[in-house]
Image (spheres, coloured by chain):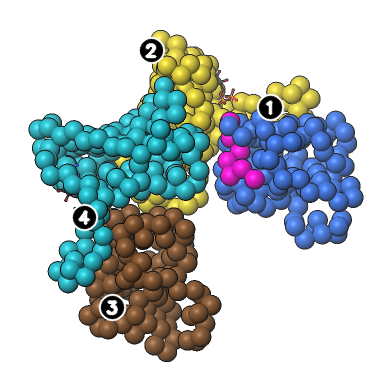
Chain colours: A yellow, B blue, C cyan, D brown
């Protein structure tokens, strides 16, 4: 098993650092260019949520990202130091007339994650939220 | 105006070339500013864009909202296959269909 | 002060992860494209040395890279878990007829680092080697 | 032959287009293999190369050594300003001068 670990302050500029790392880890893992893009996007969403909703952009609170390559599996854990949450909703969310009328233009992150990875898991406590993403070299095992 | 958008106009058309490679939380604000100055036909050019996340999608939706308010037409140009896939996932393509560089030539 | 931290196994493929991160950190810091290239190369050399000479490519031993942005200063510390060394030589090393004859085609890393950063510092013990690189936003302060 | 080098030959000339963006510890082995099959005039094309470190320089020096052994001429083409700076730092440029794509045309 090979493990790469990253810690960033809760400033969205550093999401780009995680994303760049994700691209290299995905390429090293043997992913196609398209799958690397999926990985980057899923991780980008998770890290931005950790920064914004978990750590409320307090730069003293860190976001940790752990990449673990284990045979055919790439597991990525994104953790924040927030208060935790019980309203993580991965259900389908698309652009529609209603949201355009009301001007609610957000809420796509979790849905995108659920579409882009092979499987995912959430655990949230008063110590923060951990989102675990799993992708398999040949797709869903 | 921010230099994150390179603007080109002819007749009824404004082409907004996004020059940031990332349409993300960092660039979203500067990009969506340009939705305050659209034309009856507005085209967002993604040629130089290699990454879009949901913060970017929110910024792009501001153009959709503004176009609907003014009865303008909004198109996307040079969208990579990956971003076409993402736009389809969130049904963005319904509100911002893609246009071909060639079809645009008719308006020049 | 903002701090980004990375840990990789001692496998040269992961030097690319550090390098990609370095590029984003340098850009976030406000470096020009050319200075970002200098930063990437200096860090690449330090990380490859940590992997190879420090940790002898034992993937159980980690290389740690800490980026610290502090006002006008970007400090990067690269640490390995090797036995330490007392022969770190940053002196000028160029291609010459002699090395081409003998086939000794290496030894440029430390010299390049010394040319590319504003200042550097080494500390080495039986716990390993730490190389500290410093770059300033406007060049040498 | 590895597909990290795209080879082109005409007359006395071999142009070796390096297709890896990184000339580093990972790609060095596959790149330097090509030094076993040089021509009297051999040109390394760096057009697609965006990164070279000292592991890469070692790999490139194998071409210098091989060229000297055979009395061949070795050139570099499409070297970015950053890499020109690095090549100067280590005096690589003395042993692998740059050539212009245009000058090469004379040999075709
Ligand atoms: N790490 C987290 N900590 C706390 N809440 C979270 C976290 N990640 C997501 N959430 C919650 O899930 C919601 C949906 O997230 P998402 O789908 O990414 O949309 P958006 O971020 O645009 O609201 C967020 O608004 C937030 O309430
Ligand atoms: N992290 C380290 N731990 C132990 N020795 C090191 C380390 N970094 C560099 N060295 C020593 O310094 C020497 C010179 O390094 P460098 O200039 O990068 O050239 P090269 O790696 O090609 O030998 C190495 O051969 C090694 O002996």
Residue visible at 87% across and 56% down in the picture? B107
Q: Quadrant of the C terminus of chain A?
A: top left
**Pointer 4 with pointer 3, Cβ within 8 A:** no
Q: Secondary structure at mark 1?
A: loop
Q: Secondary structure at mark 3?
A: helix
Instruction: Output the chain of dot 1.
Output: A
Q: Is residue A70 visible?
A: no
On the image, numbered disc 1 is attached to which residue? Answer: A105
The residue at label 3 has a CB less than 8 Å from ligand 2: no
On the image, numbered disc 4 is attached to which residue? Answer: C107
Disc 1 from disc 4: Cα separation: 55 Å
Residue visible at 22% across and 47% down in the picture? C90
Disc 4 from disc 3: Cα separation: 21 Å
- Please state the horizontal and vertical placement of residue C98, each as a whole percent of the image: 17, 68
**Does the magenta portion include D39?**
no
- Please state the horizontal and vertical placement of residue D102, each as a whole percent of the image: 53, 77
Instruction: Please provide the residue range marked out in magenta.
Output: B19-25
On the image, numbered disc 3 is attached to which residue? Answer: D67
In the picture shown, does residue C7 fall above or below D39?
Answer: above
Q: Which mark is residue A127?
A: 2
The residue at label 4 has a CB less than 8 Å from ligand 2: yes
Residue visible at 12% across and 37% down in the picture? C84
Q: Quadrant of residue C120?
A: top left
Instruction: Output the chain of dot 2.
Output: A
Looking at marks 1 and 2 on the same chain, the residue that comes earlier in the sequence is marked by 1
Most foreground residue, C124 or B21 = C124
């Amino acid at each position: 098993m090979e493990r790469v670990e990253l810690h960033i302050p809760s400033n969205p500029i550093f999401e780009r650092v995680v994303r760049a790392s994700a691209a290299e880890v995905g390429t090293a893992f043997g992913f196609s260019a398209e799958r690397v893009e999926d990985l980057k996007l899923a991780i980008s969403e998770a890290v931005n949520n950790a920064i914004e909703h978990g750590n409320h952009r307090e730069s003293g609170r860190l976001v940790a990202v752990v990449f673990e390559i284990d045979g055919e599996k790439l597991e990525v854990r994104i953790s924040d130091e927030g208060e935790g949450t019980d309203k993580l909703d991965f259900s389908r969310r698309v652009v529609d007339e209603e949201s355009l009328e009301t001007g609610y233009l957000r809420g796509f992150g979790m849905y995108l994650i659920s579409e882009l990875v092979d499987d995912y898991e959430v655990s949230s406590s008063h110590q923060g939220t951990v989102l675990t993403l799993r992708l398999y070299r040949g797709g869903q095992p | 105006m921010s230099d994150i958008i390179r603007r080109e106009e002819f007749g009824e058309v404004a082409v907004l070339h996004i020059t940031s490679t990332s349409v993300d939380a960092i660039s979203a604000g500067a990009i969506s500013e340009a939705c305050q100055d659209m034309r009856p036909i507005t085209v967002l050019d993604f040629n130089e864009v290699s990454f879009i996340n949901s913060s970017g999608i929110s910024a792009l939706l501001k153009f959709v909202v503004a176009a609907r308010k003014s009865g303008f037409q909004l198109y996307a140009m040079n969208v990579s296959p990956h971003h076409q896939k993402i736009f389809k996932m969130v049904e963005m393509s319904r509100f911002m269909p893609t246009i071909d560089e060639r079809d645009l030539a008719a308006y020049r």
